[in-house]
Image (cartoon, coloured by chain):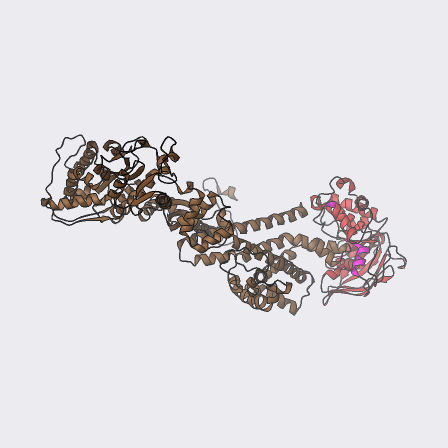
Amino acid sequence: MAGRQGKGAKQTTFQTDIEGFHDNLPRRNRAARTWLLVLQVSTIIGVIALAALLLNIFDGAFGYVAAQNSIDPGTLVIGVQEEQMLNAPNTFSSENDNELAEGVASSPYAIGFFGYAYYQDRVDELRTLAVDGVEPTADTVDSAEYGLARPLFLYSTADIIQDKPQVAAFLNFYLDRVSQEIEDVGYFPLSDSALNTSMVTWLLATGVATDEGQEVKWPVINPQGVTGDIVSAGSSTVYPLSARMAEQFEQAGYSGDIEIESIGSTAGFRRFCVEGDIDIANASRPIKRSEVEICDQIDREPVAFRVGTDALAVVVSQENSFLTRVSSEQLRQIFTTAVTWSDVDPAWPDEPIQRFIPGADSGTLDFFVEAVFDQELADMPKEALVAILQANVSEGLFRRFESENPFTERTQEEVYDLVLERVVEPQIVQTWPLFESIFRRSDVLAEAAAKYPDAEVEFVSWIDPEFVASPQSADPERAGVRTAILGSLWIILITVLFAFPLGVGAAIYLEEYAVENAINRLIQTNINNLAGVPSIIYGMLGLAVFVRGLEALTSGKLFGLVDATTANGRTILSAGLTLGLLILPLIIINAQEAIKAVPNSLRQAGMGLGATKWQTIWHHVVPNAMPGILTGTILAISRAIGETAPLVVVGASTFITVNPTGPFSKFTALPIQIYQWTSRPQDEFRNIAAAAIIVLLIMLLTLNATAVLLRNRFSKRRFS
Amino acid sequence: MTLQNNQSHIPDIPTSNGRYAIEACDLSVYYGDFRAVKKVNLGIEPRKITAIIGPSGCGKSTMLRAFNRMNELVPTAHADGEVLFQGLNIYAEDIDAVQVRRHVGMVFQKPNPFPKSIYENVAWGARINGYKNNMDELVEKSLRQAALWDEVKDKLDQSGYSLSGGQQQRLCIARTIAVKPQIILMDEPASALDPVATLKIEDLMRELAENYTIIVVTHNMQQAARVSDYTAFFMMDEDRAGYLVEYGPTNDIFTNPQDQRTEDYITGRFG
């Protein structure tokens, strides 16, 4: 037919008798394509929904955290060492540096340390020592070669200096006069070059100079010419110097109000960079890189003006004939454990050391300890760590640690871990979810640095071996899922032991033996309906039947196990039986389907050989239905593992720190734990809930994989 | 072989059943209210092959299954009348269907080996029936009798499903022989097989007929003519109940039928 149409017209349709066939065909094809699209779209939506669920879980289980120590470990170390120094024999301590200076001067066997200024008052009576081979001079102090020195800074920004002439004037006045006043306050003046650097910085910041190499005359600004207030805050070390300069600035005619707060360098930087409400930050250390980054957030670019150096002088009397230089190591001994000078160096006289040190309230002692001892908490001897622990935890807790494992038995590392956990106690102050941590990493880090400058920011996985191995705890950082995992496993064991044989047995009876009648139809209908009953109903049933009705059995009293902790039948056994009831209909229905799928020819073959019905069922029907039965059981167990509501009703405990030991233990389960954690207000609980969900998923996959392997072995043995 | 004590015991060796290996007397079979086979009287000659032929739905298979009570697997089925085997009515109340089936084995239309090894396929029936002697010997003997030994002797531990359709059917025959029945029922044993495999099965049936009484249902009249010694021709009446029209030596039925309906059927006028 097609051939007859000739070559000219291109034919694409066949002739047909059915009217409208060709009009119909595109519509039918369109419908087919549309349905295909619908199917594809629903598959994609399903996949996306599942992926979103998984991503959401992972989002919570990993990410940055900012952990802040309750106590700075450095402070603990300093505290211990100060204690040691103050308690050393022949030690005189005073807040009055003049007393110390006098004391040292009074004996050739005396030694002491204090601000360099006080030494300078008594140069004829006292002599400074070279520490680690370096004498304290203006040069060595300025270059930081001398270990017991720290630089003093003022920080501001070019914008502030240009916007507020009073700030520019104050800094101008400060740099102009500081070297004349600083020794009075007790610090070291800057070297000319260092002072020059600060002045150049001022010139560049004000815009008077535009280039470092430029020769510019130092302008002196008249304080009378400026108005407006100046706010500054920061280091307590810098404070007396700044206060003195401010006083003189006012005396010179400044009419505004100048405010100086002594709050510490770190707090000063925070005011300067976060709140941004101060013009000048006083600091006894250089600004940290992280602090510069935070400043950047409020568009402040700090510029540093070094104004001087704080140094401690380690001094002996001019009458001392044997000591000119000491090492840090010797200083440590001299001020702590050594009793006589010869204890430190046999060449020195066998005379007791007389020590004169500043009191514990003074920052000077802190600074000395920090600079000379320079010890990490982790390196402290065990005894010191035990002392720290004893001083910082409650007596009861300390006794508990002692009774759990005496400190004499513990290693230094164990005690250190305990100190870290209980005293330093890093507290997580904020957490960030995974995707924010990855895609907005710099924002997260900047935010953390801004809000918690002392905190350590690190990327953590909330799920780790410790999380799996730890018991429940009220502290999210210490809480784990060990008890919950064991609880879940015990419950599932009971559930399977109860529901599997019962369910398969019922299925065999219903499929192979039960005759078709009204009663059996009713039973079948009820089983199908029970599979759809809300799980909480099973929980109430379990409460009534297993917890209350069969308390003697489920609490273990029947077996002579009367244990006060088994909480009236609210045990693993009750929970397992309840979940067993819950999945029983599922197992029955699935097993019935599997048994139905066994071909009748197998039954006939068996019976035809003279086997009894039971032999046929046992040898052929059940083994061939087993893969299907196991598939159904796997699904049912997966459901049981994830059930929460019935367990809550049956009486799961939410807080258990001891492992369940058997069917008569109190219990908790993973979903209970997750549920309980998600309802807590603190963020970290949501993170560990996410981690616990992953644990639950892994447990589920492991159990399923085991069952699938088992099933595959079954079917392989039979059919290949 | 021990059977349950309180039940009549059917001895392994036939003692008396008249001249027949098995005999249906006034046998009717019902599925619920529906009568599938009506008042059949049929005596099966021992160590011969008896073919049951007839048009579709005339109750051939039901009749065959009535000889070892396999119909009872259908919950609503029941039988009236008697089937005498070794002088006992197998439908008598104190006769256990299990021992009937052990003596009257069956081979089905579609090969249905167990999803087990070839060896296990043969051994299982004997084992569950309490066979305690040398199983290897029994398996080999059964497979040899089923003309399958040479083909499978090297792969006895492979699955029964690994065999071809014809081999599977011979495996099913071997499995049936292994429990040492006296009668083997075959329900269209070659209908699912190709012509070569069919021929092999037919040859095997001839060989087995030396030791066993065989009753075979077949659709294929040539097969009945080729293989059987006796032929029973069934038809159904207006109530769709099957009844025996004519029974006699195969030669007579095919060359000199006494009944017009038989002649019409074998000459292909209907069916």
Chain identifier, brown in the render: A
The answer to whether one can see residue A461 in this image is no
Q: Nearer the viewer, residue B155 or A253?
A: A253
Residue drawn at 14 percent across, 44 percent down? A248
The magenta region covers B92-118
Q: Nearer the viewer, residue A713 or A309?
A: A309
Q: Position of residue A27 (x, y in %)?
A: 46, 53
**Image side of residue B249 versus residue A145, left or right:** right
Q: Position of residue A290 (x, y in %)?
A: 31, 42
Q: Position of residue B108 (x, y in %)?
A: 74, 53
Chain B visual colour: red
Q: Is residue A543 above or below residue B220?
A: below
Q: Quarter-wise, where is residue A438 in the image?
A: top left
Image quarter in which the C terminus of chain A is found? top right
Residue A39 drawn in magenta: no
Residue B109 drawn in magenta: yes
Q: Position of residue B244 (x, y in %)?
A: 80, 61
The answer to whether one can see residue B103 in this image is yes
